[in-house]
Amino acid sequence: MMQNRVGIIGFPLTHTLSPAMHNAAFKALGMQDWLYDKMEIPPDIPRHAVEEPRRHGYIGLNITIPFKETSMRYCVPDDKARAIGAVNTIDFRNDVGTNTDVDGFIGDLEAHAVPMKDQTVIVLGAGGAARAVVYGLWQQGATVLVVNRTLQRAQEMLSQLTFSAGVTSAKAVTLDEAVEHNPSLIVNCTPVGMYPNVGESPWVDGIELPKGITLYDTIYRPAKTKLMQTVEQRDGRAIGGLGMLVRQGAKAFEIWTGKVAPVDVMMTVCLEELNKRNNN
Ligand code: NAP
């Protein structure tokens, strides 16, 4: 049987949930001729990381750290990838590279019926995840306030987004300034509070967390971070980042296969994998 191969490139790939998620989706839809591989590639050969799978007839790739930015050079980035400056999915049939993190994040907010249009949103962090989140929120008509440990990095990220995508209505501020703007949503895009540092929180001590606010924490291990717990204690609503991960995968699945992804199957498998790791 001819295999339709897709897979993920990155380094390291010890913790990736993507192979389990995609292979379960193929199985659920009876797609025995599809296979998702894990390819750990040394960071110093970014061109080979993309070109070898292409040469070997792969249908497409997922791309993760440290190849998301460098892979832009070895595909045809679409508007989204260009805006964010990073590619996480390539379809080798047309060589288009896109960034499905935006779809994953916005799709999960929509699935949870979180309003975005005309809302003020605080984004914590200014790295790769924040870039996709700020771009997505801007597209949805939100006003975004970026708060980052290194203010200059936040300013640089916003200048780049203005340059690459015309992003306006986003600015870099301090946390005490941000909370005065009546935000309805906070998005954590820092790794603070992620396993194994589960006792940490990116919220600065001494600044009151707004009551009744919604938090989207892009972290998914643990399922409930310290910051999520604090928000709930203050009558807010907290959503963890697993849905974003699953939905970015679902979008890639749809690009490669042309089929509607079985999101529930993919979510269940990820939860099972995470449970296994927590028990080890
Ligand atoms: P990154 O590019 O390294 O950026 C990390 C950001 O967090 C930077 O802005 C950094 O601030 C800030 N930060 C790091 N340590 C901090 C600390 N101790 N205190 C305050 N701020 C700190 O990482 P990334 O790729 O954006 O990923 C960030 C997190 O997003 C990941 O850990 C992951 O949990 C999550 N994520 C989730 C998904 C999903 O699908 N759910 C997808 C992607 C990422 P400086 O600029 O000051 O260094």
Image (spheres, rainbow, N blue to C red):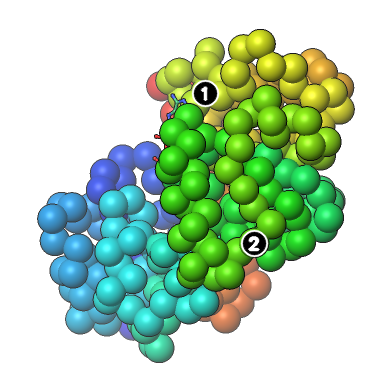
In this rendering, the answer to whether 53 lies above or below 182 is: below
Q: Amino acid at mark 2?
A: Thr
Q: Is residue 71 left or right of residue 138?
A: left
In this rendering, the answer to whether 132 lies above or below 237 is: below
| Residue that carries the numbered disc 2 in the rendered image | 168
| Residue that carries the numbered disc 1 in the rendered image | 193
Measuring from the top left, give residue 44's x and y in whole percent.
13, 55
Q: Sequence order check: which comes first, mark 1 or mark 2? A: 2
Picture quadrant where residue 145 is located: top right
| Dot 2: element | loop
Measuring from the top left, give residue 99's x and y in whole percent.
49, 66
Picture quadrant where residue 6 is located: bottom left
Picture quadrant where residue 12 is located: top left
Viewer can see residue 127? yes
Q: Amino acid at mark 1?
A: Gly
Where is the C terminus found, in terms of image quarters?
Answer: top left
In this rendering, the answer to whether 11 lies above or below 45 is: above
Q: Nearer the viewer, residue 222 or 122?
A: 122
Q: Nearer the viewer, residue 247 or 75?
A: 75
The residue at the point 44 percent across, 41 percent down is 152
How many numbered markers are drawn?
Answer: 2
Q: Residues within 10 Å of mark 2 (few under 14, many from 20)?
A: some
Determine which of the numbered discs, if any, sits on residue 268 in the image: none
The residue at the point 61 percent across, 37 percent down is 173
